[in-house]
């Protein structure tokens, strides 16, 4: 079976006359983790929302294997983890997971320590880190071929981060994953390729020293 490739080209976005994204392009194929870095307000979250189809761009061309995708959330080609917690408070984790996780991945998902620790609890009984870890893992194990993760490491302890970085790598064998977070060291560790959003444009980083050149990291 041929691998699927998600491509985004010529994405443009303006707010109040200010160009946020201009001529943005990227591609992600199944089996890849693409790390998306950039300073606050550079448009990382907006780009993920445009790919998913919940934010209107000035212009965009998003396709999977050449087929134009207008709404990424239709028919499960993409799944999206927003910055904010998205799970309702008053439902047990196991019931929620049944609605989100791909049945074909259910056994794999239920073996995760994060799930085994929390499956019989309500969402509002979990700490911020426990909740973020679980909802990220649910999204990763959904039916979608491409996973968009917006700040999955928020509120996550180093131990929790290590636990689910290995899950990201395992799931990336069959999915394409685009991930952004301010904890850049986690992004660099888990990603196959890194893209920097700089002045509204995409810079494909082939060497981490380029992050210093473009002013994202200091040289100290």
Image (cartoon, rainbow, N blue to C red):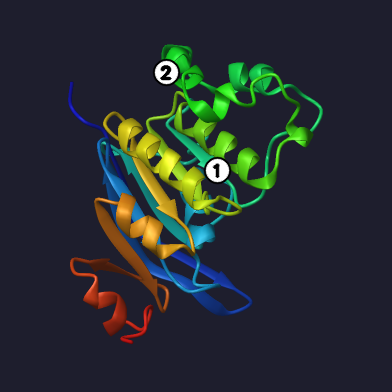
Q: Label 2: how many residues lie within 10 Å, few (<14), some (14-19) or many (20+)?
A: few
Residue 75, horizontal then vertical, whole percent: 48, 25
Among the 4 quarters of the image, the one containing residue 38: bottom left
Closer-to-camera residue (29/173): 173
Residue 68 visible to the viewer: no
* Secondary element type, mark 1: strand
Image quarter of the C terminus? bottom left
The residue beneath circle 1 is: 81
* Secondary element type, mark 2: helix
Q: Is residue 127 left or right of residue 53?
A: right
Among the 4 quarters of the image, the one containing residue 3: top left
Label placed on residue 108: 2
Extreme residue toward the bottom, this view: 220
Q: Is residue 47 left or right of residue 185?
A: right
Give the mark, 2 or 1, whose residue is nearer the N terminus.
1
Image quarter of the N terminus? top left
Residue 185 visible to the viewer: yes
- Residue at left offset 39%, top offset 43%: 165
Q: Is residue 38 above or below residue 177?
A: below
Q: Is residue 67 left or right of residue 39?
A: left
Label placed on residue 198: none
Q: Is residue 10 above or below residue 158?
A: below
Closer-to-camera residue (93/55): 93
Q: Total marks drawn?
A: 2
- Residue at left offset 54%, top offset 73%: 40
Residue 178, horizontal then vertical, whole percent: 39, 48
- Residue at left offset 50%, top offset 33%: 137
Extreme residue toward the right, this view: 90
Q: Is residue 91 above or below residue 207?
A: above
Residue 218, horizontal then vertical, whole percent: 36, 84
Whether label 2 touches label 1, CB < 8 Å: no
């Amino acid at each position: 079976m041929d691998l699927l490739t998600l491509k985004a080209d010529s994405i443009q976005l303006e707010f109040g006359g200010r160009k946020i994204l201009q001529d943005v392009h990227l591609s992600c194929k199944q089996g890849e983790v693409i790390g998306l870095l950039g300073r606050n307000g550079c448009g990382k979250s907006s780009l993920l929302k445009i790919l998913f189809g919940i934010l209107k761009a000035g212009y965009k061309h998003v396709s999977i294997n050449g087929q134009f995708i207008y709404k990424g959330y239709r028919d499960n080609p993409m799944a999206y983890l927003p910055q904010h917690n998205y799970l309702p408070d008053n439902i047990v984790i196991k019931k929620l997971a049944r609605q989100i996780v791909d049945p074909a991945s259910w056994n794999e998902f239920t073996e995760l320590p994060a799930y085994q620790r929390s499956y019989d609890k309500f969402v509002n009984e979990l700490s911020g880190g426990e909740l973020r870890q679980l909802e990220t893992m649910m999204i990763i194990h959904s039916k979608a071929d491409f996973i968009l993760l917006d700040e999955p490491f928020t509120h996550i302890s180093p131990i929790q981060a290590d636990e689910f970085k290995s899950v990201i790598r395992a799931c990336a064998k069959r999915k394409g994953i685009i991930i952004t977070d301010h904890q850049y060291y986690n992004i660099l560790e888990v990603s196959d390729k890194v893209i920097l959003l700089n002045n509204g444009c995409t810079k494909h980083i082939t060497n981490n020293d380029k992050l210093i050149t473009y002013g994202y990291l200091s040289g100290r």
